[in-house]
Amino acid sequence: MSDAILFAVEEGMARLTLNRPTRLNAFNAELAHAWRDATAEATSRADVKAILLDATGPAFCAGGDVIEMAATMGSGADITALAEVINSGIRSLTESSVPVVAAAHGTTAGGGLGILLSTDYAVVGSRSRLGSLYANIGLTPDLSVSAQLARAVGQRRALQLVLQDRLLSAAEAVEWGLVAEAVEGADAAAEADLVRARAEEIARFWLAGAADAYGHAKRLVREQPGRSFVEQLSEEARSIGASMETADARARVAAFAAASAKKTA
């Protein structure tokens, strides 16, 4: 696998690390293809029950590497084709039954926002800034920004981001519901380490609990926009029935029932 993304699996957790720090982890062709391959592997392996997405350097992801694209790509069709490669990785994450946590320190902008939205729980630093910024250079949102942003924060707030050059502060991103939490460090480097540590803590929490149930809960929420209300109720009923047939659920339900009986005895 390319050095543009680092990939490792340990004790049920896959860690995907964007690794173009000198370009603020902006996507070029190499990173796009590595991203597609790494996400496909992480979400298809039976031994992976949680995914942590982080990045090297001072920022999480600045979106597409516009400078390299301008120098190496001859047409809009080339850009479209590259975006579709990255979209394949986004679909791997969002369509999987594996929960994904992002450690998004520093700046997240442009397509990087779509990458963050493709995770299920995001941790940022108090110094983090998040925004769209596409229109500043005459481009339109891609990498799932228009597909996911309004679902996450509401249409009016989504429009505020895509129609301005605004970067949200970490506190604003938490308040809007764009990210789950922000942590603070003594300086930028220390804060990035704390962001990664907190994200790993979240992933370990999933792994220590009913990992498969967390994964299917994520799947139910992610898939809901594609179903009617009645269809979603039916899928919920089917899913909880299937869950109850697993050894893990049976053991946990029995333990819960025994504990409850002991309290009321």
Image: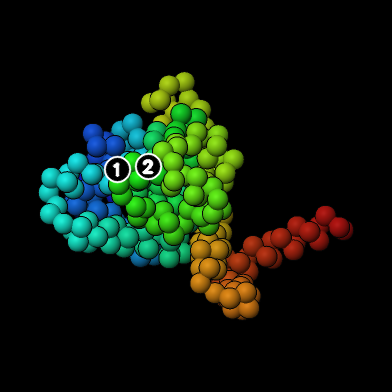
Label number found at residue 133: 2
* 201 sits to left or right of 21: right
Separation of residues labelled 1 and 2 (CA atoms): 8 Å
Where disc 2 sits, the SS reads loop
Who's the residue at 35% across and 49% down the image?
111
Who's the residue at 55% across and 34% down the image?
171
- Residue 146 in the image: x percent, y percent? 43, 56
Q: Nearer the viewer, residue 136 or 72?
A: 136
Residue 239 visible at all:
yes
Q: Is residue 73 above or below residue 228?
A: above
The residue most toward the top is 186
* 80 sits to left or right of 156: left
Who's the residue at 74% across and 63% down the image?
257
* 142 sits to left or right of 182: left
* 19 sits to left or right of 204: left
Q: Nearer the viewer, residue 196 or 184?
A: 184
Q: Nearer the viewer, residue 65 or 93?
A: 65
Q: Nearer the viewer, residue 181 or 69?
A: 69
The residue most toward the right is 265
Type of the residue with mark 2 = Leu
Answer with the quarter of the image where residue 132 lies.
Answer: top left
Check disc 1 and report the residue beneath it.
137
> Label 2 near label 1: C-beta < 8 Å?
yes
In which quadrant will I find the C terminus? bottom right
